[in-house]
Amino acid sequence: MCQLQVNRVRAMNRQCGFTLIELMITLAIAAIVLAIGVPSFQGMMRNNRVAVQMNEFTSALNLARSEAVKRGVNVGLEPNTGGWAQGWTVFVDTDGNGSLTDAAETLRVYDRLEGNPTIDNTVASIFYLPSGAITAGGTQQINYALDPSDSTTLRRICISPVGRPSIGKEHTACP
């Protein structure tokens, strides 16, 4: 019985926990994992933001195209004051003058894009005919960059003559 009590006392006096060396090794491993993971995570977040913004613009194009076909009238997209990066408006061209006026029926107004992107294009506005085709006749292209110095954020939206938008890397040519 005495021996049993001695073992209990020894067990109670024994302290459990980490040694300083174990703690330092764990912190060093955590620092290495964070040093590798954080830049990759930032790149993933940046690419995700680009994808969201491109999908928003493409959905606006699809809205304009489907409304043109459904209503049997011209429907357009026009940039807000300051250019495409400041947002855009999808509208029905009720008076047929080819621009957003007081007489036009506004379908949806899109807000300014997050992150101050650069949208470089010569397209002042995009119009869909009741057939779903664009009025310009040829392929329209819109170049987009969330950060022009970062080649991973460069994208190009191509709108085919029949009105179908597609997204690709900026260095790829529109079909």
Image: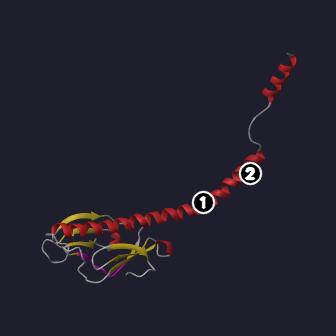
Which label belongs to residue 25? 2
Instruction: Locate the N terminus by quadrant.
Output: top right
In this view of the protein, can residue 61 be seen by the observer?
yes
Which label belongs to residue 37? 1
Q: CA distance from mark 1 to mark 2?
A: 18 Å
**Residue 103 sits inside the magenta stretch:** no
Query: Can you give x and y, in whole percent of width and height, for residue 112 in the image?
Result: 34, 66
Q: Nearer the viewer, residue 94 or 173?
A: 173
Q: Nearer the viewer, residue 167 or 88?
A: 167
**Residue 121 sits inside the magenta stretch:** yes
Q: Residues within 10 Å of mark 2 (few under 14, many from 20)?
A: few
In this view of the protein, can residue 150 be seen by the observer?
no
Farthest residue, direction bottom: 138
Q: Nearer the viewer, residue 63 or 38?
A: 63
Left or right, 108 with respect to 20, comes to: left
The stretch of residues the image draws in magenta is 120-127
Q: Quadrant of residue 126?
A: bottom left
Q: Residue at x 28, y 68 (%)?
A: 62
